[in-house]
Structure formats: C-alpha cells, structure tokens
Amino acid sequence: MVNPVKNIKSDDVCNRNVPEKVSHGIKIDIHNLNIWFAENHALKNVSMQVFSHEILCAIGPANSGKTSFLRTINRLNSVLPNFKTTGAIVLDGQDITKMDVELLRKKVGMVFAMPSPLPLSVFDNVAYGARMSGIKNRNKLNAVVERSLQQAYLWQEIKDRLNESAFKLSGGQQQRLCIARTLAVEPDVILFDEPCSGLDPISTTKVEEAMLKLKESYTIILVTNNVKQAARVGNRTAFFLNGELIELDRTEKLFTAPSDQRTDGYIRGKFG
Amino acid sequence: MISSLGKQKIAFFFLFLANLLVIVPVGLILLIIIQKGLPAMTWQFITDIPRQGMRTGGIFPAIIGTIYLVAGSILFALPIGLLAAIYLSEYAKDNVLTRMIKLAIVNLAGVPSVVYGLFGLVLFVSFCKFGASILAGSLTLGIMILPIIITTSREALESVPAMFREVSLSLGASKWQTIRHIVLPNAIPGIITGTILGIGRAAGETAPILFTVAAFYLPRLPKSIFDQAMALPYHLYVISTQVPNVEEKVRYGTALVLLILVLFVNLVAIVIRSQFRKKKKW
C-alpha cells in the first residue's frame, strides 16, 4: 500500500477567527479506498481530496456507497462485524487508522440521517462530548453549550428549555440540536449523513443555512439524497453509483455540464 | 356457515378462556392460603421462635433466615451476572462459541433446583469447607439465579437502540464510556426485572437449601454467615410432612408469610424500577 502522507503538506490554516479566508489546502486525502461488508463490495477504488472550508456533497442513488464512504472517515464502520477496508484516508497528513480512534472522532464529527438525540436533557446532549473528554467544570460546560447552540441557530428557540428531554423538541430542532452537539466537541470536519431526510422544507432551509455558515470554520462533507440540496449548498459535488466514484467536480459544472452520461441521467432524474 | 363476526366471537371466547384458566388457579391458591392462614397471623406468630416442636410459637427465625438467604444470593449473583451480561452483549464477538455460551446460560435456568443443591453441597459445603451455612446456601441460591439475571440483563442491554451507541461513539466517547453513560442507565429497568425474578426464585426454593443451609429446628437466630439457619420454604415442608399434629392454620400461616415476603420484596423492586422508567426520556 502506498502511503501518500509524505507528499502532502498538512493544512494548518484553519484559523477560526478569520472565517472569510477560504483556504484550499487539502484537509482529507483519500487513496484507493475500498470497502467490503462481508462479500458486498460497497466502495470501489475511490480516490479524492477534500479541501478545507468547503462543502463537498456526495450524491447518488441508494446503495451507491456514499454513506459507507462517510462512515469510514470517522471509522464508525469499524464497529460492524465483517467490515473490511483497504486504501488510505489521510487527515491533516495523518493516516486515520494510525490515529487514536476517540481523538479521530473528536476531529471528525458526524450528524446522522434521522434526528438522534441521546435519552438525556437538551443540555446534557450538547455537553455530552465535552463531559466525555473530562470537562466537569459547570461554567465551562455552560459556555460550551451556549456557544454550540448559538452556532446551530437554536439558542434563541430553546434557551429556556435546556433541562427538558431532548425528545420533546420538534424534529427540526432535534436535528439542529444534533448539529450543536457535534459542534460542541470542536471538530475540524463535520460529516452530514442525509441530515434533512426526515425534515420538512422549513427545517431543511434552517439546517442548510447553518451548514453554509459553518463551512467558514469547518470542512463539511454532506451526503444527500436531494440533488437540489447539493446544488444549493455544495462547493463541489461527487456522484457515486454502485460503489464507484463516477464524477467529482465543481457543483455548477457538475450540474450544468457533467462529463459522464450517467451523472447527467441521475441529475435529470432518469434513474435513482 | 358461521359469519366472520361469529368466528371472531368464538376466537375471542377461547382466548378469554385460556386467560381464565391461568388466572383462576392462581386466584384460588391465594384465596385458600389467605383464608386458612389469616387466623394464624398474630404478632407472636411473626416475632416468636417456634415452640413445642414447632407446633406453636412463631416462625421468626425462618423469616430472618429467608431474608438473609435472599439478600446473600442477590449480593452474589447481581454483580457477577451483570458483569457477565455486559461482556456477552457488548464485548464478546458474535461467533459460534459466544452463541453456545448464551444458549447454555438460557438452558441453565431450566436445570432442576435439586441439582443446584447437590452442586452446592459438593462445592461449598464439602470442598470449600463452609459447612451447612448461610454462606453456602446463599452461594448455591446465587448460582441458581445467575442464569436468570444474566439472560434478562443481557436482553435489557441489547434492547438499548444501536443508534445511541453510534451517536456516543461519534462524539469521541470510548466504548466503556458509552456503556457506562448510555447503555447501562437505559437498561436498568430490565436488569431490575431480572433481579425481581431472581428474588422470587431464591426465596421460594427448598431443594438448593436442603443440603446447604437449612436447619430442621433451630429456635434461635443465626449468629454469623457460617451458621445454619431456618428458612421459610423448608420450614413449611417440615411442618407439613415431618412433624405430626401441626395445626392447619400454622402451615397456611407460614405459606402466607412467605408469599407476603416475596410480594413485599418484589414491590420494592417494582417501585425502584418505575422510578427509573419515569426518568427515561424516550
């Protein structure tokens, strides 16, 4: 296996205080990634790069391998039996399989397809990651929770309901709570796995607004079933089909002049 | 021809009948025990030692003995059973060996209790030299209820949604932190259910304590865990079959006390469980 680490300058230009500055350093470098679940070859020889402070969208029909791809980046697939992978994912110049897995997951946060609050209060949900990292000081936790909820545009709506069960929030609020919970861990990269698939159009708009704002400080990979959503928020878009990366290009280019016929067919709604 | 409504009524009737067949015997047993045992229920009966060859006096030592045995067996079986359940549901790889172990544990719950009694006699009384004692009896009862506690706890742990675990891991929590903060708290009601079943079994069994702890007649309280003790189920057996001319109300009174004791312990566990369920936020 070729280790590409040496040739890549790690991107240290992640200064959160100057969000206007869009760096095009390479955040994640993926080389010949293959994924198997038992005999099922879910992802085939995918190589791509993810740049800092971009929203990279992954589109494609069901079973195209896009969610498997996403869950491999934070090594969440590794908990499944029969999961096998080859190739390399390099984050900031470091092979992720050589990183401490808890540290990796703090750097690469994830928002799941369905709103997935933990069976805890709103506050405890957002504070969960910080608490697991050993922060016990109440003032610090308060600050983390308020900052994260504000970043997810939820603070104004629920600042008086912090002690309620997270399950009492509406679906859209729950999903923004999950975003806040991910932000509270202060990741560099956020993986969104079809975050709006269970939401109404207004909630979807709010989540999209949050994502567009967040890319100033974070790198985002967004898996979506909604082609229009990719067109709205993606800087670049990748099209997956049957486990293969068919095409990856700037979003405007991919949607106006795709270079592959299959991409054209999918975005026009001919299949999938 | 019977109309579909008629068929539905017939089906409903048989389903109802099946339930009735379950409830009626239980109700009758309770009714008879209460009716015949209630006259024996005096303050003296509960707090006095047995007198005149157990024909009069009370059953206090047997009550205390049973409480000791139940407490001892739970103290032994709950921590070990819970740890085993955590290992089986969270850590053990899903392979043939694990599945065989799980199946073996389920089957162990069905082993006749007298077999556990013999096992306790050999291991604890003879080999470990505890003698016939509360310690040996508690350990024997503990081993008997371990399969129940392991199986119910494992089911409780496994019923915690996989989503919660994934979310916790995705936030950088370790596997143990996930178990400790997410899985265990949500499995507690189920674990308590297993404990309730275990308590009922430990309190009621006669065979496992027959060889390991039970005293035929010991009109005083046990002095230590190495002492023999009387116990309600065995006492009931003795005064029903071994001692002539025991008044009927004494026998039924003893049965009633055993029932009340088990119901009371279960009630406490059920209250604790409902407290945890109230806290459950999903």
Image (tube, coloured by chain):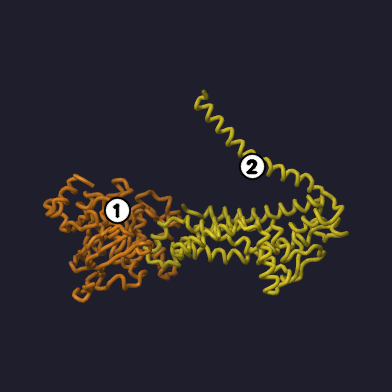
Chain colours: A orange, B yellow
Whether the residues at callouts 1 and 2 have beta carbons within 8 Å, the answer is: no
Disc 2 crowd rating (10 Å Cα; few below 14, some 14-19, many 20+) is few
**Which residue is most to the bottom?**
A6
Tally of numbered tags: 2
Residue B244 location, x and y as percent?
86, 54
Q: Secondary structure at mark 2?
A: helix
- Give the left or right position of residue A272, taking residue B53 as reference: left
**What residue do we see at 32% from left, 56% from top?**
A153
Q: Secondary structure at mark 1?
A: loop
Residue A236 lies in what quarter of the image?
Answer: bottom left
Residue B67 location, x and y as percent?
71, 61
Q: What residue is shown with label 2?
A: B22
Give the CA separation, mark 1 to mark 2.
51 Å
Residue A204 location, x and y as percent?
29, 49
The chain identifier of the residue carrying mark 2 reads B
Q: What residue is shown with label 1?
A: A194
Residue B208 lies in what quarter of the image?
Answer: bottom right
Q: Tell which of A185 and A80 is nearer to you.
A: A80
Residue B265 location, x and y as percent?
66, 56
- Give the left or right position of residue A180, taking residue B100 as reference: left
**What residue do we see at 81% from left, 65% from top?**
B218
- Give the left or right position of residue B268, taking residue B95 as reference: right
- For badge 1, the amino acid type reads Glu
